[in-house]
Image (cartoon, rainbow, N blue to C red):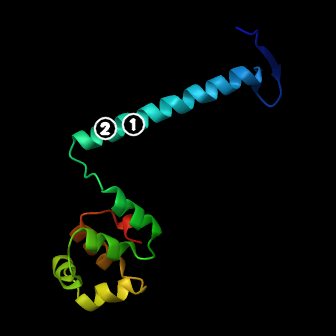
């Protein structure tokens, strides 16, 4: 291993060759990837929902994630409104761009079984 040099600045510092630094960063990133992968597998094993790739693509492209979630769950505006305890006009207005009240947004997210952040 390369001999490390230390010097005093505002605190102790260590200088290492770029190659060793890059190797350390790569190792850290690999460990983070492995941890993320393990967490994802644990969530799947615990019953987390796996979303269809086409649906995810539509979510990334749409200007109205709420509409995509509603269609994905095979609900009409009326059915979603009833499940969420809001009026159908509320769902329609949100899908046209109105900003919902937080309590309505939470109820809609619950009815669609998704996170609030996924809708807006």
In-image side of 26 versus 87 (left or right): right
Q: Tag 2: Cα neighbours inside 10 Å, few (<14), some, or many (≥20)?
A: few
Q: Which residue is drawn at the image coordinates 34% and 74% (left, top)?
A: 66
Labelled disc at residue 108: none
The N terminus - image quarter:
top right
Labelled disc at residue 37: 1
In-image side of 71 versus 9 (left or right): left
Q: Which of the pair 80/87 is nearer the observer?
A: 80
What residue did someone put label 2 on? 41
Secondary element at image label 2: helix
Judge whether 58 appears above or below 85 on screen: above
Q: Is residue 13 visible?
A: no
Q: Which residue is drawn at the image coordinates 23% and 39% (left, top)?
A: 45
Answer whether labels 1 and 2 touch (C-beta < 8 Å): yes
Q: Quadrant of residue 24?
A: top right
The location of residue 90, given as percent across then percent down, is: 30, 88
Measure the alpha-carbon separation of dots 1 and 2: 6 Å
The location of residue 6, given as percent across then percent down, is: 79, 17
């Amino acid at each position: 291993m390369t001999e490390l040099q230390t010097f005093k600045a505002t605190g102790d510092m260590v200088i290492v060759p770029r190659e060793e630094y890059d190797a350390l960063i790569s190792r850290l990133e690999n460990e983070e990837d492995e941890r993320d992968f393990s967490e994802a597998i644990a969530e799947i094993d615990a019953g987390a929902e796996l979303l269809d790739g086409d649906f995810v693509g539509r979510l990334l492209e749409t200007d109205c994630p709420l509409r995509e979630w509603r269609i994905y769950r095979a609900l009409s505006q009326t059915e979603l409104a009833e499940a969420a305890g809001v009026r159908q006009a509320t769902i329609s207005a949100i899908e046209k761009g109105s900003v919902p009240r937080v309590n309505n947004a939470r109820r809609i997210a619950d009815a669609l079984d998704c996170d609030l952040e996924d809708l807006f």
